Amino acid sequence: MSDKVKFEIEFVIQASPQLLYQYISTPSGLSEWYADNVNSRSEKFTFIWDGAEEDAKMLKRKSDEFVKFAWEDNEDDSFFEMRIIVDEITKDVSLFITDFAEEDEVDEAKMLWENQVSDLKQVLGSK
């Protein structure tokens, strides 16, 4: 298995940190934009896309700030994190995503995030 590379991507989202946090941290919120369906039992989240299931464990979370997940079938230390950043001066809210992908799949992974965050913005009524 080749090593995955870490990448980060940021999206400006016109929504309150509290509202945004509900969409990145709860099964019902995540199933609105990230996956077709999401179930959770304690810290274990099951993401469902087109009938395929992927399990992830919520490693950390801080209310209105961030969530961090790791896929259960990972054989490395990779994770994905969604962090809410509020600019102190402008009060603009950004969703800052940290993820890992194989080196030749980083562009594809970024495009996937762009599509999913586009769905999130639509759900939130953000531009």
Image: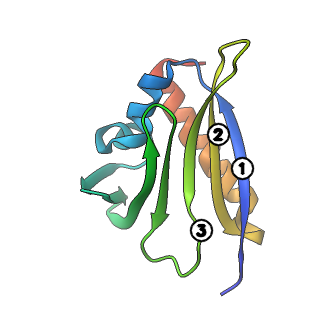
CB of mark 3 within 8 Å of CB of mark 2? Answer: no
The total number of labels drawn is 3
Residue 78: numbered disc: 3
Q: Which residue is mark 1?
A: 8
Is tag 3's residue or tag 1's residue first in the polypeptide sequence?
A: 1
Q: Residue at x 69, y 51 (%)?
A: 110
* Rendering quarter of residue 7: bottom right
> What residue type is disc 1 on?
Glu
Quarter in which the C terminus is drawn:
top right
CB of mark 2 within 8 Å of CB of mark 1? Answer: yes
Badge 2 density bin: few <14, some 14–19, many ≥20, Cα 10 Å: some
Q: Residue at x 72, y 62 (%)?
A: 6
| Position of residue 101 measured from the top left corner of the image (x, y, whole percent) | 67, 66
Q: Residue at x 58, y 78 (%)?
A: 76
Report the front residue among 40 and 113.
40
Q: Which residue is mark 2?
A: 96
> What residue type is disc 3 on?
Ser
Report the front residue among 43 and 28.
43
| Position of residue 70 measured from the top left corner of the image (x, y, whole percent) | 48, 64
Quarter in which the N terminus is drawn:
bottom right
Label 2: element kind: strand
Report the front residue among 51 and 48.
48
